[in-house]
Structure formats: structure tokens, C-alpha cells
Image: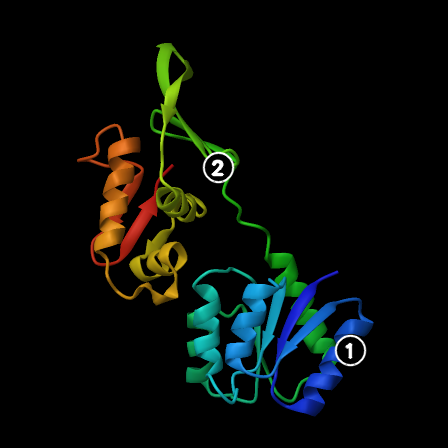
Amino acid sequence: MTRILLVEDEPQLLRALRINLRSRGHEVRAATGGAQALAEAAGHPPDLVVLDLGLPDLDGVDVIRGLRGWTRVPIIVLSGRTSGPDKIAALDAGADDYVTKPFSIEELLARIRAVTRRATPTETAPIITLGHHRIDFTTKTATVLVDEAPGGAEPSGSLRLTPTEWRLLEVLVREPGKLISTRALLDQVWGPGHGDDTSSLRLYVNRLRRKLEPDPSRPRHLTTEPGMGYRYQP
């Protein structure tokens, strides 16, 4: 059963969608405004969000940005806005699909099935090897590896990472090889209210490099794209 957060301020459409989605076996929670939607998503994390852009308090694009600050839940936009710029703004903010009104319930159900199939979990691998370290995200332990024979390594001691260092490392290694923007890292590690102060991010990236990179001055695994963001290279 898919948990769906339905964000729509038109009472008749909201009622019709809720009835149809529940009749298909989905669990539905509803919100009629952007602030309520963000609170619902935080208090009862959904598997999917169906979101109208024309909300009374917040623009739907701002709601998408607010959600993307901390969750990768699939988002389907449901809107009467048909212009190209509106669609681009929603998709660039992080929406996964865009359905224009009027629409058929069968089309919406097909879109729900499609994004649900695509939303394969991108969980951090439970255990990775980074340089000379064995990182276990399940137990939150980092073990120093010492090569003792060709082709082999065995554990030797542990390395302490702070909670913030763990969060930052998890975000980076979740998508190997992908550039993660500075803004996205700030939002996901410190929260959307952190602002644009990048000094903390630089500080913690450098701390991770000193702890995990064989040569922190020439990082191989936690690399920087100047002016853009950071990348994890396995």
C-alpha cells in the first residue's frame, strides 16, 4: 500500500481524488496549503506526493524546494498551469512528473505507477571501502584498514566521526560520481534554514578528508568542483 500525500485546495477535486486513490488501495493524507503539506510530510513521511502548484499560502514550487531539502520522495505536480516555464520551474525544483488539468484519473494512476517503479531506493550501501577505511553506515563505525598481504587487508582500530560528519558522508556517497551542489548539501545536512554560509561545509569536508583521504591535500574520493559543489569518487 502506497502512502500518498495529496496537496490540493479545491474541495471537490480533493474529495474525488481521495475517494479514487483510496478505492485503489492507497493510504491518503490530505493538505490544502503549502505549510500544512510540509508539516504533514515531516510528521507522516509519505511514499509519494501529489501536489497542486496553485496553493493559497505558498507557491507549489516553494513546497517542492522545501521537501527536497530533506527528502527524495517522488513528487507528481497536478496543475492547471500549462506554460513551459512553469513546468520547467517545477521540474528543476525537484518534481518527478507534471500532469496538467483537466486530466483523467486513469492517467494520474498510470503516472503514480510509473514514478513508483522508478523510485528505487538509493540507500547508502551498508558497508563501503574508502581509501584505507572500512565504513559501516549501519553501525556508524569507521575502521582503519592496514594492508598486511598482497590483495588483502584486515581491520586495525577505529576512527571516530561526528554526527554531522556521518550525515555529510552519507549524502555524498549515496550517489557515487554525481556532483552534489553546495546548496543541496547545506539543505540536506544542516537543513533548509541554514542559509548560504558555506564555511561550515568547507570545514566538515576538510575534516572528512583529513580523517579518510590517504593524502588530504590531494583528495581522490571527496573532490571539489570549484563554485559548484562536491563529488564522491569510489
| Residue 81: image location, x then y, percent | 51, 88
103 versus 151 height, above or below: below
Residue 195, image x and y in percent? 29, 66
Mark 2–mark 1 contact, CB under 8 Å?
no
Residue name at image x 46 percent, y 60 percent: 70
Residue depicted at x 35% and y 14%: 147
Q: Is residue 109 above or below residue 13?
A: above
For residue 94, say whether it is visible. Answer: no
**95 to the left or right of 11:** left
Number of marks present in the image shown: 2
Where is the N terminus found, in terms of image quarters? bottom right
Q: Position of residue 82 (x, y in %)?
A: 52, 88
Residue linked to disc 2? 137
Can you tell which of label 2 and label 1 is closer to the viewer? Answer: 2
Q: Amino acid under label 2?
A: Phe
**Numbered badge on residue 96:** none
**Residue flagged by tag 1: what amino acid is it?**
Asn
Q: Quadrant of residue 181?
A: bottom left
**Residue 226 at x, y percent in the picture:** 20, 54
Q: Which mark is residue 20?
A: 1
Name the residue at the right extreme. Answer: 23
Which element carries disc 1, helix, strand or loop? helix
Secondary structure beneath dot 2 equals: loop
Q: Residues within 10 Å of mark 2 (few under 14, many from 20)?
A: some
The image quadrant of residue 51 is bottom right
As drawn, is 96 to the left or to the right of 17? left
Residue 191 seen in the current view = yes
- What is the spatial separation of the Cα atoms under label 2 and label 1, in whole angstroms? 40 Å
